Amino acid sequence: MEKYNVFQQRKISSWMMVFATMIWGMGFIAQSEGAKHVPPFFFNGMRFWIGAAVILPMALFRTYKNTGVLSFWGDEVDKKILFRGALIDGVILFVAMSLQQLGIGLSTPSKAGFLVSLNMIFVPLIRLVLGEKIKLSQWIGVIAAMFGVSLLTLNEQLQINSGDLLLIVSTVFFALNTIVSGHYNKAVESFKYTMFRFIFGAILCNVISFSTESVTREMILGALPSILFAGVFSSGVAFSLQSFAQSHLDDLSIALILSMESVFAAIFAWLIVGDVLTSRELMGCAIIFVSVIFIQIIQGKDANPPQII
């Protein structure tokens, strides 16, 4: 019976991750549409605040479940580590999402979906800088992915769109986010950690938005559906689903499901906004996707035992 329950938990968690990945894939369209109405820092600031508000009841419920007391803080929470990690990760997430929102306004949702999947390529490269070794098989995956990126982003004159370049740089910071959040999520309660990194990111966005951007009521109304989707679903719901799923799935399973984000992004962009990629761009997408899967499988062979959040 216990084995059956574990199987059921893994099955439910897998579907939760698939649903979260679908939300993130559709989220690129919301970001692209939002970029047509409001400036990037205002958009992300609102998205962060809404995401934090959605996660708040999840954090309260988890504390109540663990302690039986309706309170935000549990006795086991190390606030110093939580705030330090949330601040560091909040700054990284602020930079990553700001660059992504700037880039997606100059690119397309389909390209954004596949370029953000390079996260799994940049993670081992960053770890190489930090002193870890990369196997020959991993280098093959990285080189193949870079070739796919060139097909997807370079035009006939071998020039790269500025939006695509911003998206690639944003993915480097998302890779840093993956490493940092992976470290701190093992030490603190994940819902509170995510909520506070959203809050720190929101504050940074608000400071820059109030200083440099001009927003009108009409602009906000035009972007409101996109802001609500990005805040409620892409930030609040999807991150909460991922947090629960990580309690029952190993890292490789999570990573493999997340790699489908690029595919969902391309499908929804085609169905909703008619974003059609050329045959050359589609070939680049396919190479990136296969390379990411290859890298994840190679990493999975040496993966550590799954951590419970």
Image: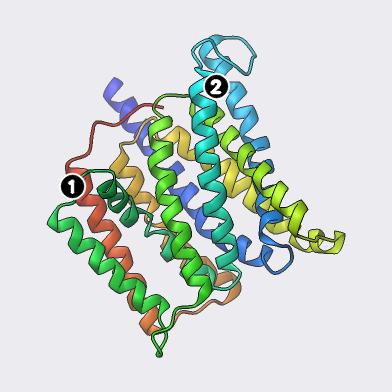
Q: Position of residue 178 (x, y in %)?
A: 40, 44
What residue is at 22 percent from the left and 39 percent from the top?
A: 303
Question: As shown in the figure, which amino acid type bears the numbered disc 2?
Answer: Arg
Image-based side of 231 in relation to 84, left or right: right
Looking at the image, the residue that sits furthest to the bottom is 156
Q: Position of residue 89 (x, y in %)?
A: 50, 39
The residue where tag 2 is placed is 62
Image-based side of 236 in relation to 13, left or right: right
Q: Earlier in the sequence, mark 1 or mark 2?
A: 2
What residue is at 53 percent from the left and 30 percent from the top?
A: 193
Nearer-the-camera pick, 123 or 282:
123
- Residue 146 bears which disc, if any? none
Is 9 rendered above or below residue 179? above
What's the CA distance linking mark 1 and mark 2?
38 Å
Nearer-the-camera pick, 295 or 177:
177
What residue is at 35 percent from the left and 78 percent from the top?
A: 151
- Residue 133 bears which disc, if any? 1
What residue is at 43 percent from the left and 49 percent from the top?
A: 18
Looking at the image, the residue that sits furthest to the right is 217
Is 254 rendered above or below residue 76? below
Question: As shown in the figure, which amino acid type bears the numbered disc 1?
Answer: Lys
Q: Position of residue 25 (x, y in %)?
A: 50, 58
Is 104 rendered above or below residue 78? below
Q: Identify the image quadrant of residue 97.
A: bottom right
Q: Helix or strand or loop: what does disc 1 sit on?
A: loop
Comparing labels 1 and 2, the label whose residue is closer to the camera: 1
Task: Indicate the quadrant containing the N terminus: top left, top right, bottom left or bottom right.
Answer: top left
Q: Helix or strand or loop: what does disc 2 sit on?
A: helix
Q: Identify the image quadrant of residue 290.
A: bottom left
Q: Decide if residue 236 is in sight here.
A: yes
